[in-house]
């Protein structure tokens, strides 16, 4: 009887480890498999969606970003998995899965993964990000 209980409890716990869904009108993302090439990168980016007003991306963060600003974009980040620290000019905040960070344009910031595995985050830029609005801090 004890063995059956332990087995049942283990199965229930395994079922709880499913990662959150990222849902769009035409496609859902869950338990994304990263390529070997992406796993080698400090930060890997998957572009998921783009509209006239925003763009959405999935990022795998293995190390840390360099401190920077986005001069023309607001950014909202949701932690999908892992643990990380978001650093601002005068403070930092420990983040875990489910946490959401809102970063207004012009805000000094950088993210640092502290999980033994890489952290995965869902990021939305407004207006849509074109890859050029990242000014490194001096």
Image: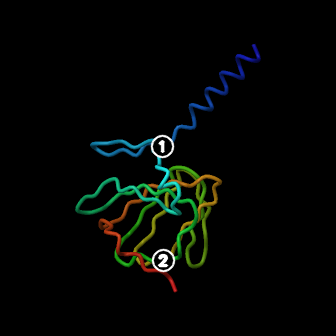
At x 40% / y 43%, what residue is drawn? 29
Q: Position of residue 88 (x, y in %)?
A: 55, 74
Q: Residue furthest left?
A: 52
Camera-near label (2 vs 1) is 2
In this picture, residue 117 sits left or right of residue 21: right
In this picture, residue 2 sits left or right of residue 111: right
Q: Position of residue 30 (x, y in %)?
A: 44, 42
How many discs appear? 2
Which residue corresponds to mark 2?
Answer: 68
- Label 2–label 1 contact, CB within 8 A: no
Give the quadrant of residue 7: top right
Q: Position of residue 97 (x, y in %)?
A: 55, 50
At x 27% / y 42%, what residue is drawn? 26
At x 60% / y 64%, what residue is drawn? 85
Give the quadrant of residue 49: bottom left
- Residue 20 is tagged as 1
In this picture, residue 64 sits left or right of residue 46: right
* Precedes in sequence: disc 2 or disc 1: 1
Q: Secondary structure at mark 2?
A: strand
Q: Position of residue 33 (x, y in %)?
A: 47, 44
Q: Residue furthest front?
A: 37
Circle 2 crowding by C-alpha within 10 Å: few under 14, some 14–19, many from 20: some
Distance (Cα) linking label 2 and label 1:
28 Å
- Closer to the camera in the image, 60 or 104: 60
């Amino acid at each position: 009887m004890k063995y059956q209980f332990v087995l049942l409890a283990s199965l229930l716990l395994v079922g709880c480890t499913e990662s959150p869904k990222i849902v769009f009108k035409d496609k859902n993302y869950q338990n994304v498999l990263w390529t070997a090439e992406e796993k080698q990168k400090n930060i890997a980016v998957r572009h998921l969606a783009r509209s006239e007003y925003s763009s959405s991306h999935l990022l795998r963060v293995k190390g840390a970003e360099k401190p920077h600003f986005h001069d023309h974009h607001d950014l909202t980040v949701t932690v999908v998995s892992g643990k990380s620290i978001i650093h601002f000019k005068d403070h930092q905040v420990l983040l875990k899965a489910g946490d959401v960070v809102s970063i207004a344009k012009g805000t000094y910031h950088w993210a640092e993964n502290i999980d033994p595995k890489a952290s995965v985050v869902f990021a939305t830029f407004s207006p849509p990000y074109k890859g050029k609005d990242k000014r490194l801090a001096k």
